[in-house]
Amino acid sequence: MRVRLRTAAVFAAWLPLTACGIQETDVIGAGSAATVDLLPAREVRMLLFFLSPDGVLMPVPRSVGESEFAGEQHGPDSGEDGGRPATEETIAALLAGPNETEKRAGLVNEASLPALDAPARTRTSVNGVDVILAAPLAGLTRPAEWQLICTVAYAESAEGTPMVTLRGTDGTRTPARCDPQPGVVSSAAATAPR
């Protein structure tokens, strides 16, 4: 009797699985991978690009209330875009260098970046955005350029896509997008912190 009941139970469980009539299908694409915004939200943070101890360009989100470069705290009504800091403020934060927490993590500025006392202005151009530095560009290394270009690109757009042109007291660099080669951008980063 037990054998018949067990066989009947197995058959009863198996029957709905084979008789449902659902056809096998191929894999269906669901689009590109999802993207998420960094914390804190873009409206209350800036994205600065520093170099790791290994010389890798690193995006570092910083809350606008943490900024040490301005004389006042920033709230939701500051900046040009509903709370976001102006691009000039973001450049000033980059030139001021990593804060104490970022320094403890080993992050540095490339030594050839201009000093904070060389203010920067930005203006929209046909190529994207121009960064006008009150300093020469002659000594600016490629890693320092990437720090400026990527910081400005992400200050201007959540996707970091604008072309950025660096202009100094001694000339202009070719417009570029924030797209450094993956991996190490500077071998001197760890030896020349700023």
Image (spheres, grey):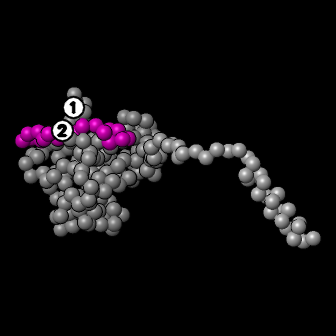
Q: For the magenta stretch, what is the residue range?
A: 155-174
Q: Compare residues 82 and 146 and report the one nearer the observer.
A: 146
Around disc 1, counting alpha carbons within 10 Å, would you say few (fewer than 14), some (14 to 19), or many (20 or more)? few
Q: Secondary structure at mark 1?
A: loop
Q: Compare residues 119 and 186 and report the one nearer the observer.
A: 186
Q: Earlier in the sequence, mark 1 or mark 2?
A: 1
The N terminus, quarter of image: bottom right
**Marks 1/2: CA–CA distance:** 7 Å
> Residue at (90%, 71%) from the top-left corner?
2
> Residue at (9%, 52%) from the top-left corner?
139
* Residue occupied by mark 1: 127
> Residue at (17%, 46%) from the top-left corner?
118
Asked if residue 75 shows in the view, the reply is: no
Dot 2 amino acid type: Pro
Reply above or below: 145 against 189: above
Dot 1 amino acid type: Asn
- Specify the farthest residue to the bottom: 2
> Residue at (18%, 64%) from the top-left corner?
187
- In the picture, measured across the screen, residue 151 lies left or right of residue 32, that is left
Around disc 2, counting alpha carbons within 10 Å, would you say few (fewer than 14), some (14 to 19), or many (20 or more)? some
Please provide percent x and percent y for residue 171. Answer: 8, 39
Asked if residue 128 shows in the view, the reply is: yes
Q: Which mark is residue 175?
A: 2
* Tag 1–tag 2 contact (CB < 8 Å): yes
Q: Compare residues 154 and 161 and report the one nearer the observer.
A: 161
Verify whether residue 136 appears in magenta: no
Which of the 4 quarters of the picture holds residue 158? top left
Please provide percent x and percent y for residue 159. Answer: 36, 41
Please provide percent x and percent y for residue 57. Answer: 27, 56
Q: Secondary structure at mark 2?
A: loop
Verify whether residue 156 appears in magenta: yes
Q: Compare residues 56 and 111 and report the one nearer the observer.
A: 56
